[in-house]
Amino acid sequence: METAARMTFYFFMYSCVGWLIESIYCSVAAKKWVNRGFLTGPLCPIYGTGAVVLAVIVNPLKEYLHSAVPAGLPYYLAAMAAVIVAGMLLCDIVEFITSVLLEKLFHARWWDYSGKFLNIQGRICLMHTVYWGIATVAFLYVVHPLVNSVGKNITAKAIYLSLLIILAVFVVDLFNAVKNAMDVKKLMDKMRLLSDKVSRTAADFK
């Protein structure tokens, strides 16, 4: 129970960090502030999901491979390469599924790689797959071990209390985001019906 709570806490923490990094990156390019989250709050759940997937699935693989292979740099690099490939594949899967869900739910695409080399439906592409590989190394070999060592010093009571507050705010934020999306969908449906009516009228007139 406590492990699940800590992972949930990490999910929100990494979602916030990912939102901040991506928002700053896009804001610098656009020369104005760009909120890269689909919620009001500072969250990009795709980063939190990717981080938890890496921590729960790929990190045990990393620990096993590095303990199983013989000592020596070539074996260490081979184990690291396997970890990178696993991280890239899983992060691509997370990114693809997230793109589909966001599009189905909000009728909008938060990213589109259609113009990128070797993309699949514009949802994932080779360049960002490489980025995920770099992120896998940085996350599993540097960031998460450090965060996890600090997080172990946080009491379970503090984790539970923080999660109660975060989850309450998150649920309200998510509800508003879905409600606004539904309102936009209703408006778009009305506009589509009006457009069809105008087209039929123009055709009858002709």
Image (tube, grey):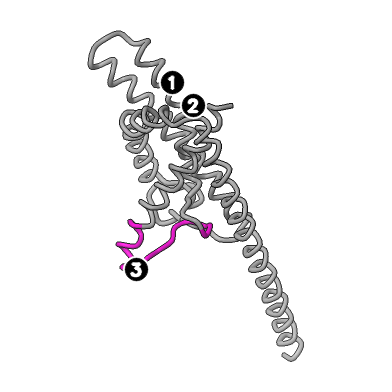
Q: Mark 1 = which residue?
A: 61
The quadrant in which the C terminus is found is bottom right
Mark 2 or mark 3, which is nearer the start of the sequence? 3
Question: What whole-number distance in Å separates the C-alpha atoms at marks 1 and 2?
Answer: 7 Å
Q: Check whether the beta carbons of the residues at disc 1 and disc 2 lie within 8 A of each other.
A: yes
What amino acid is found at the position of numbered circle 3 in the picture?
Lys
Question: What whole-number distance in Å separates the C-alpha atoms at marks 3 and 2?
Answer: 37 Å
Question: What whole-number distance in Å separates the C-alpha atoms at marks 3 and 1?
Answer: 41 Å
Q: Residue furthest bottom?
A: 205
Left or right, 196 with reference to 160: right
What amino acid is found at the position of numbered circle 1 in the picture?
Leu
Image coordinates of residue 102 in percent, x first then y, are: 57, 53
Q: Residue furthest top?
A: 70
What amino acid is found at the position of numbered circle 2 in the picture?
Ile
Residue 25 in magenta? yes
SS label for mark 1: helix
> Crowding at label 2, few (<14), some or many (≥20) Cα neighbours within 10 Å?
some
Q: Which residues are the magenta region?
A: 24-40
